[in-house]
Amino acid sequence: MTNVVARQDPEAGAPVLPRSALILVGTVVVGGIAVLGSQIQALARWDGGDAAALTVLVAVVAVVERFQFEIRYRSEEATYSISDAIWTAGLLLVEPSVLVVSVGIGVLLGQSVQRWASVKMAFNVAQMVLGIAVAAVVFTALGAPGADQPVGWLVAALAMGAFQVFNTVAMALVISVVERQPFWRVALVTTGGVHWLGNVALGILVAVMRTTEPLALPLLLVPLVMTYVAYRGWLRSEQERDRMNGMARTADAISDSGDLSTRVTETGDHDEVGVLASTLNRMLDRLESAFRRERRFITETSHELRTPITICRGHLELLGPDATREEVQETVELVIDELDRMARIVQDMSSLARMEDPSSLRLEQVPLDRFLVDVAAKATQLLDGRLRMSTPPPASMVRADPQRLTQAVINLLHNAAEHTSGGAAVDLRVVRETTSWRFEVADEGDGLAPGEEVTVFSPFVTGRSSHGSGLGLAIVSGIARAHGGVAGVENRPGRGATFWLRVPR
Amino acid sequence: MKVLVVEDEDRIAAFLAKGLRASGLEVDCVATGTGALALLARQDTDVVVLDLGLPDIDGLEVLRLARQADACLPVIVATARSEPADRRRSEELGAGAYLVKPFSFGRLLATVRSFEVPLEA
């Protein structure tokens, strides 16, 4: 049996169906009610056996309806159960009116246990009632043979074929209307042929056993349960294959178009494929932002290199044949100076690129006191006696790449030197925190403009007085991150700033 | 003819001024947008050479205000910004030319000279 209804959007309260779909659903429901109504006359002719058959059929269907396979398909959710097998057996064993009423009550009971929306339930019940009525008409028209003759099996199969065709058409119609797709395209894909064949064969077997040896019926349960388990596994693998194919298509599309903004569809399932899909999307997020960062970096770098090139080009171009010795000398010095600026940018760019890779670190235990003495020695020329350094706790060690860490602290000192003037002191401190060491460089310059606290660590965000490459603080931040730490600044606008970098202890 | 060079990078302003003066033009140099607008208020500028990355006001805003004050003032944008969006915006705001750094001085001079002849001639 195949039930279908538009899948509800979890965000929206109720499914929004187009008018044509509502008309279709309404027609099916009215048709179903009409068929059930027409059985009332037959009801009067029922005997005790018919009533018992009804009870058994309803009970069995209500039970098997609870063991359904749900298959999500496009915007639809199709559910399969072995109810069709019961209907096949019913065709061969009971009065058509008993079968039709059983289908109505059985499907209704089975679905109300599942607490589905009333529209969905009404449509499904009506669709089943109409379908089985069609099957009963076909079966009766072909002579309604019994289960004890092979021709009866064939006729039952034909009748169930009509039932299947009716259901497929009804389901495909709803999908094609809701999705505005050509009917035949949907109908071709939604036919569950194998499933139908299995149910019909099982139904015929039940009918044959009921006729020849009813006591053997419980034996059927064993292969049935085994088939159920195997079938469920097979369906799941089919669904997984579909989702994997979808992911592969998306991945192919991404590699063909290079469009990293595309994402694979996440169904919200928490199985392996669902986890894989969300992992893939997380990876794409990271890739996309990395590429975007890289593009911006390239744009900014080329922008940054344009200025020194313009200066060199302009000054050289104006150096005419009658230039004086002094003019030539002046231009040469200026060009060399600008070439140095370009060299610094290029050097810092490659440092920055290396910094992003934590595996490039050479970590070792570094004694803090010796580290600070080394840094101070390197900064002597830079700060010219303005450096004030506090001594770290005795025998303190930090696990770091000493070269990189030195570069980071020197860059911070450079930054302080550039943004302070005169004899203003620059403080270098190492503060012990619970899980990390915090290297601080405090100056008494002008501080940053409010809001610059974050952007200042981005490449090429330099103050006016900067003579650096514009990458110094970006490198500090990169070194901190590579060590599993972070860099930041405490800003005191107008009174200075404390730049810091934190490295885990 | 008087050229106003709006450029915050001293060494670029220096060669522009030197070259333009050597070609017989009068040159004013300013390093900020505010300075440029103040000079333009005197209304004796014939052509502006404008950098976009200025320290105070964005060059595009300077361009907008300058053209608002004098719709006939030729403005040559000379900038390191190579993105098409900046070029488009400049053209929309009425820039007479858009030169991306590094440009040749000869090209800049020719562009400045092209605005020397009155349009109706």
Image (spheres, rainbow, N blue to C red):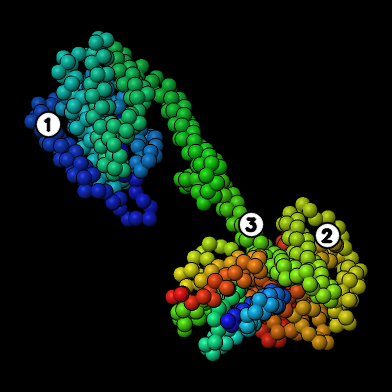
Task: Decide if residue B110 is on the left or right side of residue A43.
Answer: right
> Is label 3 or label 2 in front?
3
Residue A20: image x %, image y %?
Answer: 21, 45
User: Few, some or many C-alpha atoms within 10 Å of disc 1 (few <14, some 14-19, many ≥20)?
Assistant: some
- Residue assigned mark 3: A294
* Proximity of marks 3 and 2: CB atoms separated by less than 8 Å: no
Do the residues marked 3 and 2 share a common chain? yes
Give residue A39's mark: 1
Name the amino acid, label 2: Asp
* Proximity of marks 2 and 1: CB atoms separated by less than 8 Å: no
Residue A105, relative to residue A300: is it above or below? above
Name the amino acid, label 3: Glu
Residue depicted at 51% across the width and 41% down the height: A253
Residue depicted at 50% across the width and 48% down the height: A263
Residue depicted at 20% across the width and 22% down the height: A94
Residue A31, relative to residue B80: is it above or below? above
Q: Earlier in the sequence, mark 3 or mark 1?
A: 1
Q: Nearer the viewer, residue A487 or B42?
A: B42
Real-space Cα separation, disc 3 to disc 1, in angstroms:
74 Å
* Residue A64 visible in rendering: no
